[in-house]
Amino acid sequence: MSCSIERFAIEYRLDAEGMIDRIDNTESLSEMIDYKNSKLQQLKAFFNSLNEGETVKDYVTAIYNFIVDNGILIKLEDEIHELEETDVRLRNETEQSYNLFIRLLDDSYTVFKDEEIDFSLFYETFIDGLKSATFNTRPATIDQVIIGLLDLAKVENKKYIL
C-alpha cells in the first residue's frame, strides 16, 4: 500500500485507559475505492455511448439504457412506493419529476426524429425543457382546496389564502 493511502487507512485513537489503539481501515477504504471505480466505469461507458451517438434517438437510447442498466429505474420505483406510506407530497413530486424527464426525452425524439444533430444542441434544448418545467403543487387528496370570493370568505380557519 502506498504511503499516502496508508495515512488514511491506519487510524489511531485513545482507548478508555488512555492507551493508543490502532485501527486498520484498509478493507473499508478498499471497498469504497472499488465502489467509486465501478461508478466511474458506468459513467465512462455512458459518456462513450453519448459521444458515439449522432441522432437524438441515439442520445435518448443511451440515457434510457443508463437508467435501466444501472438500476436507477428500480430504485426510483422503490422510493415512490416507500413514500406512498410516509410522504404523499414528496412521492407526487418524485413521480412528476420522473414523468417530466421521460416526457422530455420523448418530446426530443418527436421533434428531431432520426435527424443528425450535435449533442450540444440536444443538451441545450433538453436543459431548456427542464428549466421551463412546472409541477402540480396542489395539496394531496387528504387536503381541501376551496375557491371563492375573498370578500365573502371567512379566512380565520383556513391554512392558506391565495
Image: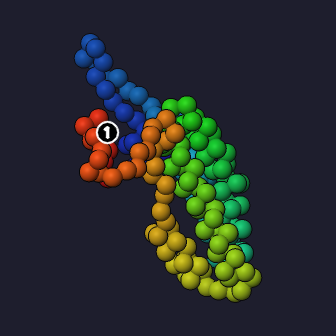
Residue under the point 39% across and 42% down: 8
Amino acid found under the numbered disc labelled 1: Lys
Residue under the point 61% across and 57% down: 99
Q: Position of residue 119 (x, y in %)?
A: 60, 80
Q: Position of residue 104 (x, y in %)?
A: 60, 68
According to the picture, the residue beneath numbered tag 1 turns out to be 158
The image shows residue 125, relative to residue 85, as above or below, that is below
Q: Position of residue 159 (x, y in %)?
A: 32, 39
The image shows residue 154, relative to residue 119, as above or below, that is above
Can the viewer see residue 30?
no
Q: Which residue is more in the foreground, 95 or 142? A: 142
Q: Which residue is more in the foreground, 51 or 72? A: 72
Name of the residue lying farthest toward the front: 152
Q: How many marks?
A: 1
Describe the element under mark 1 as helix, strand or loop. Answer: loop
Direction from residue 10 to residue 74 in the image, left or right: right
Q: Which residue is more in the foreground, 16 or 123? A: 123
Direction from residue 21 to residue 86 in the image, left or right: right
Mark 1 nearby-residue class (10 Å; few <14, some 14–19, many ≥20): few
Q: Position of residue 41 (x, y in %)?
A: 62, 59
Name of the residue lying farthest toward the top: 17
Can the viewer see residue 83?
yes
The image shows residue 80, relative to residue 51, as above or below, that is above
The image shows residue 25, relative to residue 44, as above or below, that is above
Residue under the point 49% across and 74% down: 128
Direction from residue 125 to residue 144 in the image, left or right: left
Residue under the point 55% across and 31% down: 85
